[in-house]
Every structure is written in C-alpha cells, then in structure tokens.
Image: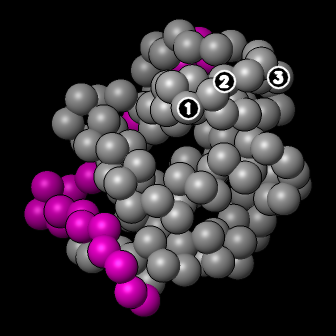
Amino acid sequence: MRISIQGLEQAFRQDFAKKYRRFGGFMDSGPLWEEFCQVLGNRELLSHILFCNDVMQIPPVRTHLMISKSRGGAAASRKLNVREKQELGAAYGFLFKEVFHYPRQESVSCVINTLKTATRYEQDEAQPLELTKGECER
C-alpha cells in the first residue's frame, strides 16, 4: 500500500475527532500537537517510526519521545501528564489503525518520560506500506 505524506495532516484533522471524540481537543492544543504534525509532514521521521514499530517492535509513542528528546522537542522538555500521554497514544493509534490500516495492536512495556506502557501495531505482511509524496491514498 502506498500512502503519501502530502495531505496527511489534513486527513488527520478531518477524521481524528470523529473517531476519537474524547481526544478531539488534542488538535491545535499546543507544542505537543505541533510536534506530532511535524512528524506527519516529515517522510524520513515517519519512516523511522514505521521501521521501529515494524522491525524493532518499538511502539510509535516511544520512538516519538526518543526523537523529541534527541531534538530538544516539546515532548521531551518536561514530564507528560496523563491526558497528554493518552492524546499522543490516540493520535498514533488513529494514524496506524485508520490511515495505515494496521489490523492488530499490542500493549507492551515502555518506560520513557512518564510512560509505563505503549501500543505497537502489526500489519498484514501481504500489505507492505510505502510512504511517498503526492496525493494521499487512504
């Protein structure tokens, strides 16, 4: 399956609050949202997050926090509160389940920042995912 990063934020904005009503306020909520949008618009970072999830079995939220720490980003500059952890998890849940169409998920131990567990996602091997530029193919 080919998915373009162009329009990914717009697709996210369009459907996230409908699917995850409880976390609809995450959009435009500040630095953590902005950092997430930077990932959505960066093919290289998103590819690293996919690789870590698919090959290394590292949950996307953990990879996000590690990237943030290495870049001095918003998620690494302080301890995340419960709501922020849930919002970031829901955002990656939507991305992997609804946009990338990963059918399975697993909660795993993940100790970073204030996280204790995080979700990693499993795709069907018959459906390899390729990030491209151009129109979004959802």
Query: Residue 114 at what x, y percent from top left?
Result: 68, 13
- Residue numbers of the magenta segment: 115-135
Relative to 31, is 37 on the left or the right?
left
Query: Residue 65 at what x, y percent from top left?
Result: 56, 28
Tell me if I can see residue 99 in this picture: yes
Q: Earlier in the sequence, mark 2 or mark 1?
A: 1
Relative to 61, is 89 on the left or the right?
right
For image coordinates 56% across by 14% down, the residue present is: 112
Q: Secondary structure at mark 3?
A: loop
Q: Nearer the viewer, mark 1 or mark 3?
A: 1
Relative to 98, is 37 on the left or the right?
right
Of all residues, the one furthest to the bottom in this rendering is 135
What is the three-letter code of the residue carrying label 3? Answer: Asn
Q: Does the residue at mark 2 contact the one at mark 1 (Cβ under 8 Å)?
A: yes
Q: Secondary structure at mark 2?
A: loop
For image coordinates 41% across by 53% down, the residue present is: 46
